[in-house]
Image (cartoon, rainbow, N blue to C red):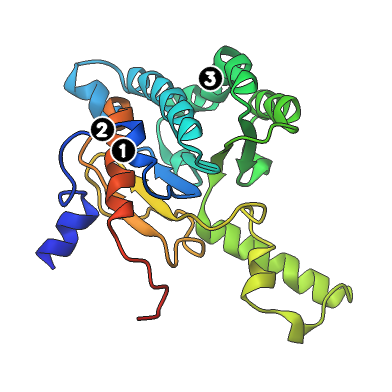
Amino acid sequence: MLKKIQQWRGKETSGNYSKEDILQMPVPEHIAIIMDGNGRWAQKRALPRIAGHHEGMKTVRKITISANELGVKALTMYAFSTENWKRPKMEVEYLMKLPEEFLSTFLPELVEKNVKVQLMGNRDAIPNHTLNAVDKAIEETKHNTGLTLNFALNYGSRDEIVHAVRNIVDDVKNGKIIESEINESLFSGYLYSHALPDPDLLIRTSGELRLSNFMLWQLAYTEFYFSDVLWPDFSEQELYRAIATFQKRGRRFGGI
């Protein structure tokens, strides 16, 4: 059990890696990241929590560009959960401004790098100014064919699953599908992430060992990597280390 926890934390892979090292073996097609530790990063420096979120935004840009260069096809970032509304009002308001700030600053670079922006989550409670910024980025990158940068915003996996069940029930009632057609594949098509493959690798930063209501259905056969590094300090080298760990594991999907 100790060895398995060490593997989850990435302890079985040490040393430094180059992009060329990582490209010697297949890279994960879809990486999902729980970006944790912004507040603690700020508190360690006697700064307000929002300073950590601002610094974390820079890390999103850095890791997105690095993943794109490695040929990763999809990168899902857990930006704001359905539970994050419980945080102080000032912090929530700042978090809802971050997508505008990020995209207004980095959208030209994302377009240049052939990155496609998507949104995954319940749009109903997201402020219009946030949605307008995200929708503008989605529209301007819709024809891009490189990495898909998928922001999980106002996202909760239980909410997603309930939403899918309700829509399936409605479609059965309306005769769009019949009950016997319901299977795992059909159900996945009703999730917010229906356009993406399930993640191959989940990374969570800051040392926490939990999923926090993130992609519970989609992570059934995902490899987990937990890093002690706080998100604003998560570097390209940390990403390489996580992928190198993934590359050393055997994925049997229930087989032998």
Q: Earlier in the sequence, mark 1 or mark 3?
A: 1
Judged by depth in the image, the label closer to the viewer, 2 or 1, is 1
Q: For the residue labelled by badge 1, is the local secondary structure a helix, a strand or a loop?
A: helix
Residue 126 placement (x, y as % from top left) = 63, 35
Residue tagged by mark 2? 230
Inter-mark Cα distance, 2 to 3: 19 Å
Residue ID at (54%, 43%): 74
- Residue 235 lies, in percent from the top left, at 30, 28
Residue lying at the far right of the rendered structure = 175
Q: Which residue is mark 1?
A: 21
Q: Is residue 107 left or right of residue 243?
A: right
Q: Counting other residues with Cα less than 10 Å from the Cα at mark 3, is it few (<14), some (14-19), or many (20 or more)?
A: some
User: What's under tag 3, amino acid-wise?
Assistant: Phe
Label 2, label 1: how far apart the Cα atoms are: 24 Å
Q: Earlier in the sequence, mark 2 or mark 1?
A: 1
Relative to residue 78, is residue 232 drawn left or right?
A: left
CB atoms of marks 2 and 1 within 8 Å? no
Determine which quarter of the picture holds residue 20.
Answer: top left
Residue drawn at the location 48% of the way across and 22% of the way down? 94
Q: Position of residue 158 (x, y in %)?
A: 52, 61
Q: CA distance from mark 1 to mark 3?
A: 30 Å
The residue closer to the viewer here, 14 or 226, is: 14
Please tell me how crowded label 2 is: few (under 14), some (14-19), or many (20+) other residues with Cα within 10 Å. Answer: many
Residue located beneath label 3 in the image? 102
Q: Tag 1: residue type? A: Asp
Q: What amino acid does circle 2 point to?
A: Leu
- Please rate how many residues cluster around mark 1, counting C-alpha atoms within 10 Å: few if below 14, some from 14 to 19, many from 20: few
Report the front residue among 42 and 109: 109
> Where 76 falls versus 18 (above or below)?
below
Number of on-image labels: 3
Q: Quadrant of the N terminus?
A: bottom left
